[in-house]
Amino acid sequence: MLNKIGIFTFLSALGLTLVVAYFVPSVATFLNSEPTTVEILTLKIPLLFVVPPVIIALVARIIRLHDKMSDLFGLRARFDLYRILIPLCGSLHISVDKNFRDKLSSRRKAAMERTYYAYASFEDPKISKALVLSAIDRWTWYWVLLESCVLLGIAGSVLLVFGAYVGDSLVLVVLILAMLLFSTYYDACGKLADAQIEEIVAEPERATKLKAEFTQMRNNS
């Protein structure tokens, strides 16, 4: 998943570097100053056009940019709580009041490991592996779109600084479209989570173990 995200982050950064160079002549002059070219997808591109995307992709991979953005906006935390843990309780007929919800929220990672990931982990899934792989693929594209939105925002800011208002407007339109697509993927990931939860609790023995786990979490101070 991380490799796929990294590749698309690099390609997005490369495309946006080309866009910035197209609308800002001074940037284009600088990037074309080095005659050495590199071949990417059969295209020969001047070396300096490739350097910024490589740096951006490496930094994004090292700091896990999508994780940082997820933590900043609470994306994964909200999803885990409201699309996995609480629905999983509901499927087991366990009521979730405010106190229990707060416990699940504050101990989210441990709760996910003890319940959902005990059956739907990538390494050793106890449910359909095809369903788990589909969820991972969907999440991969979700994070790809998130990092692309960040890069579009950066490129738009650069174009604005240079006074390239036409280019900035075009990037803004693409950013809005990307954000709309990004928002639909949240619900799409949720639907796959629903299918996984349904399969997890379908087996009585698993349902019994999960009820015991949630009961223990509810009773712990």
Image (spheres, rainbow, N blue to C red):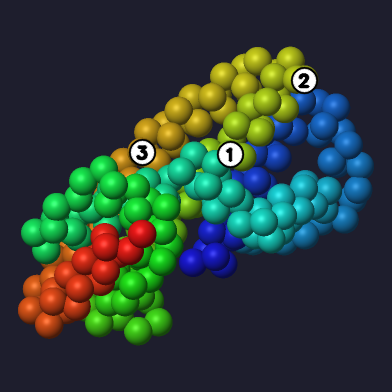
Closest to the camera, between mark 2 and mark 3, is: 3
Q: Check disc 1: other Cα within 10 Å, few if <14, some if 14-19, many if 20+.
A: some
Work out whether residue 99 or residue 209 is closer to the camera in this orientation and state it. Answer: 99
Work out whether residue 19 or residue 97 is closer to the camera in this orientation and state it. Answer: 97
Mark 3–mark 1 Cα distance, whole angstroms, equals 14 Å
* Residues marked 2 and 1 touching at CB (< 8 Å): no
Residue 183 is marked as 3
Q: Tell me if I can see residue 75 in this picture.
A: yes
Residue 150 is marked as 1
What residue is drawn where x is 13% and y is 74%? 207
Closest to the camera, between mark 2 and mark 1, is: 1
Farthest residue in the front direction?
221
Horizontal and vertical percent position of residue 148: 54, 43
Horizontal and vertical percent position of residue 167: 63, 23
Relative to residue 77, is residue 15 drawn left or right? right
Q: Tell me if I can see residue 130 in this picture.
A: no
Q: Check disc 3: other Cα within 10 Å, few if <14, some if 14-19, many if 20+.
A: some
Work out whether residue 163 or residue 197 is closer to the camera in this orientation and state it. Answer: 197
What residue is drawn where x is 50% and y is 31%? 175
Q: Amino acid at mark 3?
A: Ser
Task: Give the mark nearer the N terminus: 2 vs 1.
Answer: 1
Residue 22 vs 196, above or below: the answer is above
Q: Amino acid at mark 2?
A: Phe
Q: Check disc 2: other Cα within 10 Å, few if <14, some if 14-19, many if 20+.
A: some
Write down the residue under mark 2.
162
Image quadrant of residue 89? bottom left
- Secondary structure of the residue carrying tag 3 is helix
Work out whether residue 105 or residue 17 is closer to the camera in this orientation and state it. Answer: 105
Image quadrant of residue 141? bottom left
